[in-house]
Image: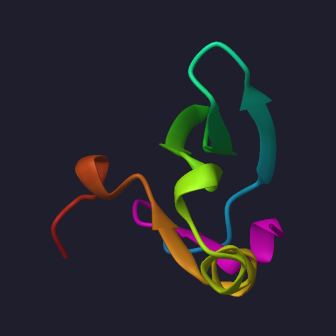
Amino acid sequence: MSPKQITCARCRKPVESTSWWDDHTTRERVLQVRCHGAVDEMRFRPDRLSLEQLRAFSEARGVAFTDEAKPS
């Protein structure tokens, strides 16, 4: 997933970087984003998603750091 697809809720810009890996101990895929010195992470089980859902996920847009967003 491209960093341009994930917006930071704090600064309202695309996140600085994204990375992902498979955690074989939990069988989860981990998506980690970094922006303004902070790290946010999402985990999901790809084996519980259909191929169509995985494709949609890879093309989706998202928002990170929603718990830390400052009110406007």
Q: Position of residue 44 (x, y in %)?
A: 52, 47
Q: Position of residue 19 (x, y in %)?
A: 81, 44
Q: Position of residue 51 (x, y in %)?
A: 72, 77
Q: Which residues are magenta?
A: 1-10
- For the point 77% across and 33% down, the residue is 22
Q: Position of residue 15 (x, y in %)?
A: 68, 60
Residue 17 falls left or right of residue 28:
right
- For the point 63% across and 53% down, the residue is 46
Number of marks: 0
Residue 40 vertical placement versus 24 (above, below): below
Q: From the image, which quarter does the C terminus lie in?
A: bottom left
Q: Is residue 4 magenta?
A: yes
Asked where in the image residue 69 lies, by quadrant, the reply is bottom left
Judging from the image, the colouring scheme is: rainbow
**Residue that lies at the very extreme toward the left in this rendered image:** 71
Task: Tell which of 12 and 42 is nearer to you.
Answer: 42
Task: Tell which of 11 and 40 is nearer to you.
Answer: 40
Residue 70 vertical placement versus 33 (above, below): below
Q: Is residue 61 magenta?
A: no
Q: From the image, which quarter does the N terminus lie in?
A: bottom right
Residue 57 falls left or right of residue 4:
left
- For the point 62% across and 74% down, the residue is 50
- For the point 83% across and 70% down, the residue is 2
